[in-house]
Amino acid sequence: MNSAVNASSTVFLLDVDNTLLDNDRFASDLRAHLTQQFGQAECDRYWSLYEQLRDTVGYADYLGALQHFRRDSDNRPGLLATSAWLLDYPFEEHVFPHALSTIDALNKLGRAVILSDGDIVFQPHKIDRAGIYGAVRGEVLIFVHKERSLDAMQERYPASHYVMVDDKPNLLAAMKRVLGDRLTTVFVRQGHYAAQADLASLSPAPDHVIEHIADLKALAGELVPAAA
């Protein structure tokens, strides 16, 4: 991938987890796998380590949590099985309906770019395995905190206007406070974060709210002329 791209009038910035693919399903399947391999108590220990690590590094790190999980006893056969399970997980089966065709539609209106946060190994693996990397033509950014990396995003993808699509309205509000009218925010009401969101307490509120990522295809045509 080149270090710079030509300016586009509109760049559509797309979150991944629970926006384009069902990450809640992945987490549920991982819980079931860990319980089957190690029992409920050890499954709970893994998720406790996962939460501690996320608080420390600022993003989800499933592989890193497994590294911590193995420290007390690294000779259990279930560890290698879990490593293989994570790397072989069929993310392509859990992309939300019409998500990839929506990306294709966005690329006809502007430029579709993944803007995600996460670790630098498993998150890109997930994006590639799901078929998302190909759909966005390799245009992927992964930061520790994407809402704090907007200068780097704009340098990489200069545009007159941006559209951010995410399942976390608090992140949308944080980005809107920085970019102002140059950013249109779209909240996708999918996943557990979206279900827990209190839109009434957010300032600014999302510019648009949709129930499913597939709904973005119909909305996108309205965003580009407004941005222009």
Image (spheres, rainbow, N blue to C red):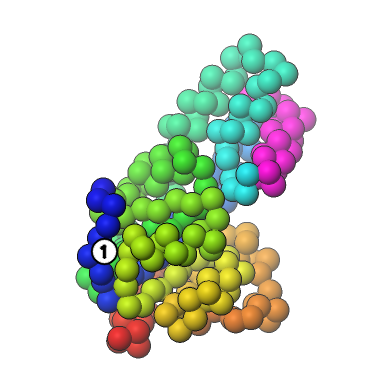
What's the magenta region? 37-56
* The C terminus: image quadrant: bottom left
Mark 1 Cα-neighbour bin, 10 Å: few <14, some 14–19, many ≥20: some
The image shows residue 119 at horizontal and vertical percentages of 51, 42
Q: Secondary structure at mark 1?
A: helix
The residue closer to the viewer here, 90 or 127, is: 127
Which quarter of the picture shows residue 69? top right
Q: Residue at x 36, y 77 (%)?
A: 161
**Predominant secondary structure, magenta span:** helix
Residue 162 colored magenta?
A: no
Q: Is residue 149 left or right of residue 113?
A: right
The three-letter amino acid code for the residue at tag 1 is Asp
- Disc 1: which residue: 104
Residue at image position (40%, 53%) is 141
Q: Position of residue 139 (x, y in %)?
A: 31, 55
Image height of 18 relative to 94, above or below: below
Q: Say whether residue 46 is magenta.
A: yes
* Residue 153 seen in the current view: yes
The answer to which image quadrant residue 96 occupies is bottom left
- Coordinates of residue 14 in the picture (x, y in percent): 42, 63
110 lies above or below 42 = below
- Report if residue 190 is visible in the image: no
Q: Is residue 48 left or right of residue 176?
A: right
Q: Nearer the viewer, residue 216 or 157?
A: 157
Residue located farthest toward the top when viewing the structure as drawn: 75
Q: Please give left or right for residue 9 compared with residue 203 in the image.
A: left
- Residue at image position (66%, 28%) is 68
Q: In this figure, what is the number of numbered marks? A: 1
Task: Tell me the residue at 62%/61% (across/down).
Answer: 193
